[in-house]
Image (cartoon, rainbow, N blue to C red):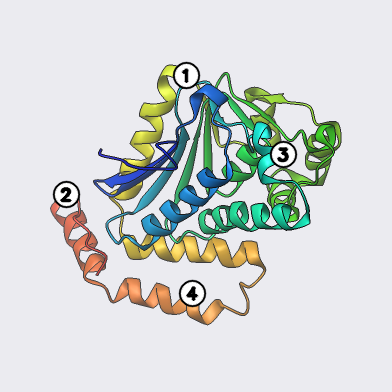
Amino acid sequence: MELTAGADGRILAGQSEGIGRLVINNPERRNALSLDMWQAAGGAVDALARDDAVRVLVVSGAGGRAFASGADISKFAEERTGPEAVAHYGAVSGHLYEALATCPKPTIAQISGYCIGGGLALALCCDMRFCDEGARFGVPAARLGIGYSPDAQKRLFDLVGPGFGAEIMFTGRQVDAGEAARMGLVNRVLPTQELEPVVADYAAAIAENAPLSLATAKATKLAIAAGSFDAGRQALQDMVDRCYASRDHAEGKAAFAEKRKPTFTGR
């Protein structure tokens, strides 16, 4: 897969065979994100979300030592000094979170090593989180005297519950992969050598499925998370009806009868 570089090569993005990729490529700093990286990543997610060829998006970190260790603290004096700078930084990083959280395609966080602070907030925006046995998770905001985004806290509490969420936020400690799995923070914990191929298999399986069906499932998930399920029920039912009226539904039935793999086009 050929990836397009942004933020001087520290953000990589592209797609192939229905699988979109966003790679945080700053391994010498454990994939910490600077302002220009947040901005480039947000633009990349926007583009991948609009691309009809993309059926699933995988987010990962380069180097194997970290998914993302959050905001680059060495840049705080330059990028986050004063109310205006803090607000601008929050708007730029918030755009990436929102773009990923509301992406109409299924999303997978492939987590190797450290997933800390803003990195964990990024992973929480994905539909699924797969990690290796060496993964570490935490929110050190209380140890740095900074506030953690209310939206990120809500996603954390919604996922692991108020008890575990409070433990993570109040202590600032890191939890290992096994504890993260017990909390419900991740879907699966895998041996390091199996993480990438397993995620690739999942992504390929999703990419082979009917785009209209995937869009309906994702829209329903988003509506439930936003508390708008009842208000949006008719729109969701319209998406279901569109699935049944689609060429892909006819293709799925024919493929089942003929004992072959279906070829879906999203129509």
State whether residue 205 is above or below residue 140.
below
Q: What residue type is labelled 4?
A: Leu
Q: Quadrant of the C terminus?
A: bottom left
Residue 151 in view in this figure: no
Under mark 3, the amino acid is Ala
Position of 253 with respect to 32 (left or right) is left
Judged by depth in the image, the label closer to the viewer, 2 or 4, is 4
- Between the residue at mark 2 and the residue at mark 4, the CA separation in whole angstroms equals 30 Å
Q: Mark 2 points at which residue?
A: 259
User: Residue 167, percent across and down?
Assistant: 83, 35
Task: Tell me, for residue 236, which label it has, or none.
Answer: 4
Report whether residue 183 is seen.
Answer: yes
Q: Which of marks 3 and 1 is in front?
A: 3
Residue 167 got which mark?
A: none
Q: Of the residues under marks 3 and 1, which one precedes in the sequence?
A: 3
Q: Do callouts 2 and 3 mark residues in contact (Cβ within 8 Å)?
A: no
Numbered circles on residues, count: 4
For mark 3, what is the residue?
Answer: 77
Image: 155 above or below 233: above
Name the spot of residue 54 as percent of width and height, x first.
32, 54
Q: Image quadrant of residue 6? A: top left
Question: Disc 2 or 3, which lies upstream in sequence?
Answer: 3
Residue at 78 percent across and 42 percent down: it is 165
Q: Nearer the viewer, residue 3 or 171?
A: 3
Considering the numbered disc 3 on the image, is that residue within a helix, a strand or a loop?
helix
Q: Is mark 1 on a helix, strand or loop?
A: helix
What separation in Å lies between label 3 and label 1 (alpha carbons)?
36 Å
Disc 2 is placed on an element classified as loop
Q: Quadrant of the N terminus?
A: top left
- In the picture of the structure, the residue carrying the numbered disc 1 is 192
